[in-house]
Amino acid sequence: MTITGLYAGILALIYLVLTVRVIALRYKSQTAFGNGDEILMHRVRVHGNFIEYVPLALILMGILDWQQTSVMLLHILGITLIVGRILHALALTCNILPFRMLGMVATMGVIFVEAVLTIAHYVL
């Protein structure tokens, strides 16, 4: 059984929540295209930022999973990614800037660790 599937599933559910939030506001404001008002712009960026970072993190996690990386380490990376993405979404939704920084540091930290471990597997 792979660990990546668990986190891909959880993150997919978060993605769907973010997607529905954008769709609902587009419907309510009758904004088919563009960013509309500031609230819609924030929701679009939360959604966009999620889809910009999560796929790469999951691809790298999947490679580490395939390389039989420690199950505990994979769970730490997966949980950190989920927490980071939730903090980032809350930061942009509720305008809590420290959450945005924590969310991005967590996300980029996960991608960095995954990248280094993936490369190390082939170099060492």
Image: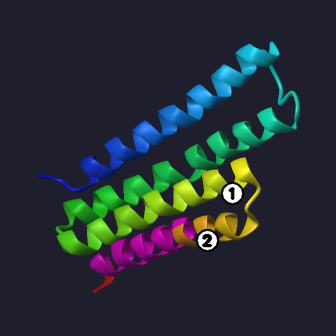
Magenta-tinted stretch: 107-122
Q: Is residue 117 magenta?
A: yes
What amino acid type should be assigned to the residue bearing mark 2?
Leu
Residues 25 and 117: in front is 25
From the viewer's perspective, is 107 left or right of 28? Answer: left
Say which residue appears at 33% left-offset and 51% top-offset: 7
Q: Is residue 121 above or below residue 1?
A: below
| Main secondary-structure element of the magenta-colored stretch | helix
Q: Is residue 90 above or below residue 25?
A: below
Neighbor class of circle 2 (other Cα within 10 Å; few <14, some 14-19, many 20+) is: some
What amino acid type should be assigned to the residue bearing mark 1?
Ala
Q: Position of residue 60 (x, y in %)?
A: 38, 60
From the viewer's perspective, is 91 left or right of 4? Answer: right
Q: Quadrant of residue 81?
A: bottom left
Q: Could you say whether the residue bearing mark 1 is in a helix, strand or loop?
A: helix
Farthest left residue in view: 1
Say which residue appears at 39% left-offset and 54% top-offset: 58
Give the label on residue 102, or none: 2
Q: For mark 1, what is the residue?
A: 91
Say which residue appears at 50% left-offset and 38% top-offset: 15
Q: Position of residue 4 (x, y in %)?
A: 28, 53
Say which residue appears at 62% left-offset and 51% top-offset: 89
Q: Could you say whether the residue bearing mark 2 is in a helix, strand or loop?
A: helix
Please say if the residues under marks 2 and 1 sit with CB atoms less than 8 Å apart.
Answer: yes
Pointer 2 or 1: first along the chain: 1
Cα distance between the residues tagged 2 and 1: 9 Å
